[in-house]
Amino acid sequence: WGWAGGRGRGARGCTVEENGVRTSHASAGPTSVYVGLGRGNDFVTPGATPILPAGMGLPPTSQPICTAGTNIANSVAVLAAFGAQHILVPNLSDLGKTASAVAAGPAYQAGATALTIGFNNALGAALAGVYTLFPGSVMPFDTFSLCNQILADAWSYGVCGTTQSCLTGGGAHGAATS
């Protein structure tokens, strides 16, 4: 369910993926682990009303950010209501630390980090009600902090070359081509 897109299918948001699960299965497996993962496609795929009020310090792009967070939370709630009892929901890693953001410079990095934080805040706010409705079924995962911790001491994790891309882009929707 966490995969959003596919060869020849175009951009798909998490609500499209969640609808596909519901139409192809009688119920969610209560012992299975699901990952509620939505990202870029959910910034551009409309389908939910933002739940965060104006003036929360989000950048002007807050509408797609709120919509993406709400789409994910709605899909997680539907999946839980469908019978899933173990749903892991990771937030977004710091886009300001990606190779493309580093290459674009400090101003771009700061903007990308601000968008990431805005998205993560919107997702957290949208999930608050889901945690109440389905206590113990939805587990948040702080990808943002984990990735920043790894980047801060990359060598101790066996990671090198953290400022260059390991893939080249150019395919549909930025898919790697080599």
Image (spheres, helix red, strand yellow):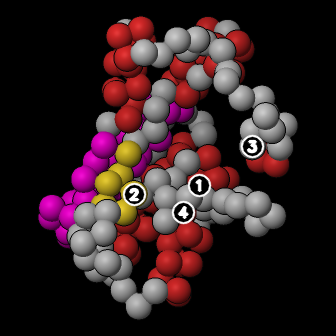
Q: Residue at x 59, y 23 (%)?
A: 98
Amino acid, disc 2: Val
Q: Earlier in the sequence, mark 2 or mark 4?
A: 4
What residue is pinned by disc 4? 14
The amino acid type of the residue labelled 1 equals Asp
Could you tell me if residue 67 is visible in this image?
no
Which of discs 2 and 4 lies nearer the camera? The answer is 2
Q: Which residues are magenta?
A: 115-141
In the figure, 35 relative to 60: above or below? Answer: below
Q: Is label 2 in a helix, a strand or a loop?
A: strand
| Residue 122 part of the magenta segment | yes
Q: Which residue is mark 1?
A: 42
Q: Nearer the viewer, residue 62 or 112?
A: 112
Question: Mark 4 and mark 3: span between their CA atoms?
Answer: 18 Å
x and y, in percent, of residue 15 in the image? 54, 69
- CB contact under 8 Å: marks 4 and 1: yes
Type of amino acid under label 3 = Ala
| Number of residues whose C-alpha sits closer than 10 Å to that of mark 2, classed few (under 14), some (14–19) or many (20 or more) | some
Q: Return the x and y of residue 151 as percentages of the image width and height.
A: 43, 15
- Name above or below for residue 8 compared with residue 55: below
Q: Name the residue that disc number 3 marks.
A: 175
Could you tell me if the residues under marks 2 and 3 are in contact, i.e. CB atoms within 8 Å?
Answer: no
